[in-house]
Amino acid sequence: MISHVRFLLSAALVASAAPAVAAGGTPERPILTTTEAANSAQRPIAFATARPTSGVLVFAVRSKADIDAIAIPGVAAAAATAKFEGKAGKTLSLRGLGGYDRIVLAGAGDKPLSASDLADMGGTVAQEVKGDAAPVAIDLGALGNVDAAQVALGASLGGYRFDRYKTVGKTTPPSQPITIVTAAADAARATWTGDLQYLAQAVTFARDLQTEPANTLYPEEFVARVQAAFRGVRNVRIEVLDEAQMGKLGMGTFLGVGQGSARPSRLLLVHYTGGQGAPIAFVGKGITFDSGGTSIKPAAGMWEMKADMSGAASAVAAVWAIAKRGATANVIGVAALAENMPDGNAQRPGDVVRTMTGKTIEVINTDAEGRLVLTDANEYVVDRYKPAALVNIATLTGAVVRALDDEYAGLFARQEPLAAQLKAAGEAVGEHVWQLPLHDNYYGDMASQIADIRNSTEGGNPGAGFGAHFLQYFVPTSTPWAHIDIAGTNWTSGGLPTAPKGATAFGVRLFDAFVRNFKPVGPDASGGPK
Ligand code: BES
Ligand code: MN
Ligand code: ZN
C-alpha cells in the first residue's frame, strides 16, 4: 500500500511539475499542484436544548448521582456493574438500552471544569464515536451551565483526520452531526459560529500543513495555501519576500539554509490590523524539510522532519483565527520558510554568513538551521514593524524533547510579565509550557574564532537554552521577546483528547488565548544581547 501511495504521488509530480533541469543546469522551480482528493469533511456541529430519541446518546457525568439521574432504564445498573463513576477522560459504552444505537457515558471528573477540560471531554467523545454512522448527541445537562461551545471545539479537534492520500481501506467518515445538548444552546451556538469554529478550522489548517509531506509542501506551496486560506478575510495584508528580495536586504543567514535545496526559500508575513498600536508578532520556524543539510541527520525518524515547519504553521493559523473572529488587536504571523537539504550548493560546516543587520555567524553545524532562518526573520520584523512583543515558535531542538517530551513546550522569555501571560494562555487552553532559564553566562559557549557568534558547539551545551540564547542575541532588548520550543509538542505519538495521533498544531490555541488577554510589557531591563 505504501508503494502504491508513493507511485501516485510521484505520478502527480511527473504529470504536473517535475523539477526539470534547464539547459544552463539551473533547476526550474515550479509549484506542484496535487491532484489528490481533499481530506474527508468533518462531522458538522450543532446545538439543541432537548436530547433526541434515537442515534448515539452521550451523557457527560461527574458522579454516581449524575448516572442515577439518567432516567433510562438499565443505564444505572450497567454503570454500577462496570464500576463506572464518571472519572475524567473515561467513557463507558452501553448498547441495547432505551431505543438508542448506543449510550455512552463520558466521565467529566469531580473537579471544577475549565474550558480546556470541556474541550478535552468533547474530543474524547468525538474519538469514541468516530465509527458511528448515526447522529450523535452529547447531553451536558448534569454539568449545569457550562461553556458548551468549548465542548464543540474539542469535538471538532478530536475528529481531525488526514486521509487525502489514502486510496485503499479508506473508511467513509460519518456525516451525521454531533449535537451538543444544553439549556444554553443559543449562547453556545453564537460563541461557536462567531468565534470558536474559526479556532477549530485554524487548528485543522495548521495540522494539514504539518502532516503534508515535503514533496507536496515546500516554501512556495506553503505560501500558496496561506494565500488561499486568507482570501477574502478582512483587514489582512499578506507580504511575501522571495529570494531576490531577501538577497537585496542582505538576509544571508536565511538564504544560506535553503541554498542546497531545489525549492526556493520564502519569508511570509500575514498582517492583521484590527486594533490600535504596535503589533504582536508570532515568528515561526518554517523548515518544510530538515535533512540536516551537509551535517546530515541519521535515517531513523528523519521523515518526522517534514513537520519542521510546525511553528510557522501555528503562527499563521493563529492569525487566521484571530482575523476571522475580528479581534480588536494588531497581529503579525510570520513564516520563515526554507528546505534544508544537502547538495553541491549546500552550505558547509564552517561557512560564515551575514544577517540583515550585518552581524556574522559561523555555521558550525548546518543542522542548527532553524535559528538561522529565524534570525533574519526576527531582524526584519523588529526593523520594519517594531512589535509590542515578538514571540518565536519553533521545533528548534532535540534537547527540549529530551527534557520535556511532548507534555510541555519549552518557554524562554526576557520579561517575566510576558512569560506569565504565555504560561497563563497555555494553561487556559491545555497547551502547557515550562519555563527554562536564560542566563548571560550561557553566551560563553557562543563565541566564534572568526565571526561574531557561532550557531552551535560540537555538543555538550544546554541545547534548548543555547538555541534560545542564539535567537535573543539578535533581538534588541527594547523588543519584548519570548521563544517557545515546540520540538516535542508539535506531534503526539500517543494521541490526546483534542488531537488524534500525529500533528497537534500546538500554539494556535495558546496564541489565540494570549491575544485575547494581552497586556503590553515594558522593554527589558537586563539580559539580552551583549
Ligand atoms: N529540527 C531540529 C530539531 C528537532 C529534533 C525537532 C527532533 C523535532 C524533533 C533542529 O533543526 C535540529 O536539528 N536541531 C539540532 C541542533 C544541533 C545540531 C545544535 C538538535 O537539536 O540536535
Ligand atoms: Mn536541524
Ligand atoms: Zn530543524
Image (tube, helix red, strand yellow):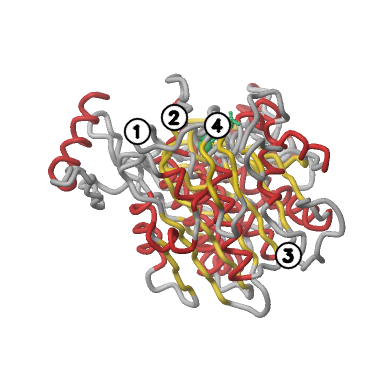
Mark yes or no: residue 197 visible.
yes
Q: Which sits earlier in the primary sequence, circle 4 or circle 1?
A: 1
Query: How far is the residue under mark 3 from the one under mark 2?
Result: 43 Å
Residue position marked by numbered label 2 in the rendering: 294
Query: How far is the residue under mark 1 from the one under mark 3?
Result: 46 Å
Residue depicted at x 25% and y 50%: 29
Query: Residue flagged by tag 2: what amino acid is it?
Result: Thr
Query: Residue flagged by tag 4: what amino acid is it?
Result: Asn
Residue depicted at x 51% and y 34%: 366
Q: Nearer the viewer, residue 388 or 242?
A: 242
Query: Residue flagged by tag 1: what amino acid is it?
Result: Asp
Q: Nearer the viewer, residue 250 or 218?
A: 250
Q: Which sits earlier in the primary sequence, circle 1 or circle 2?
A: 2
184 versus 161 height, above or below:
below
Residue position marked by numbered label 1 in the rendering: 343
Q: Which sits earlier in the primary sequence, circle 4 or circle 2?
A: 2
Q: Left or right: where does residue 192 sit relative to residue 434?
A: left
Q: Is mark 4 within 8 Å of ligand 1?
A: yes
- Residue 517's mark? 3
Query: How far is the residue under mark 4 from the one under mark 2?
Result: 8 Å
